[in-house]
Image (cartoon, rainbow, N blue to C red):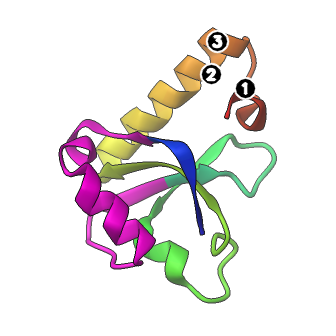
Amino acid sequence: MRMYDKLFLGPKAAKHRFTVLQRIRHQKWVDGLYVLVPSSNPENIMDILPAAALSEQHGIYRDALIIGAAKGYDEACELAGTIVAGMFRERGDFNLEAYL
C-alpha cells in the first residue's frame, strides 16, 4: 500500500489529518474511513473503498496507490468529484495517471 505525496482529504478527514494518516499507515481501520484509489477497471477513473478493504490479503487493492481519504461515503463521493473536476479543468481529459 502506497500513499500519494499530495494526498487529497475530505473536509472532515482534513480536520484529523494526522490521525487519518497514521491509521492508514498502520492499517488500523476505523468504520467510516474511505479511501480513493485508481480503478482496477480501465473504463473507470477511480474506486471508492472502505479502508478495511485494503487489508484483505488476496485483494486486488493490497498494493494500491491511495490518492484520497474521507470520513464517510458521501464525503468520499464529493472528494472524487472534486478530483475529477480539477483533473478535467487542468488537463482537459480524464487521464488520472498523467494528472497525478
Rounded to the nearest angstrom, the CA distance separating label 2 from label 3 is 5 Å
> Looking at the picture, does residue 50 appear above or below residue 65?
below
Q: Is there a contact, CB below 8 Å, between mark 2 and mark 3?
A: yes
Q: Which quadrant of the figure has residue 61?
A: bottom right
Q: Secondary structure at mark 3?
A: helix
Q: Amino acid at mark 2?
A: Met
Q: Residue at x 55, y 19 (%)?
A: 86
Of label 2 and label 1, which has the lower sequence position? 2
Distance in Å between CA atoms under marks 1 and 3: 10 Å
Quarter of the image with the C terminus in it:
top right
| Viewer-side label of 2, 1 | 2
Verify whether residue 33 appears in magenta.
yes
Location of residue 39 in the rendering, given as x and y in whole percent from the top left corner: 69, 52
Which amino acid, mark 1?
Phe
* Residue that numbered label 1 is attached to: 94
Q: Nearer the viewer, residue 40 or 62?
A: 62
Per the image, the residue denoted by label 3 is 90
Residue depicted at x 48% and y 29%: 81
Percent across and percent down for residue 19 are: 24, 61
Question: Is label 2 in a helix, a strand or a loop?
Answer: helix
The amino acid type of the residue labelled 3 equals Glu
**Disc 2 + disc 1, Cβ < 8 Å:** yes
Q: Is residue 15 magenta?
A: yes
What range of the chain is rendered magenta? 8-35
Callout 1 secondary element: loop
Q: Residues within 10 Å of mark 2 (few under 14, many from 20)?
A: some
Tell me the crowding category of disc 3: few under 14, some 14 to 19, or many 20 or more residues within 10 angstroms, Cα based.
few
> Which label sits on residue 87?
2
**Dot 1 surroundings within 10 Å: few (below 14), some, or many (20 or more)?**
some
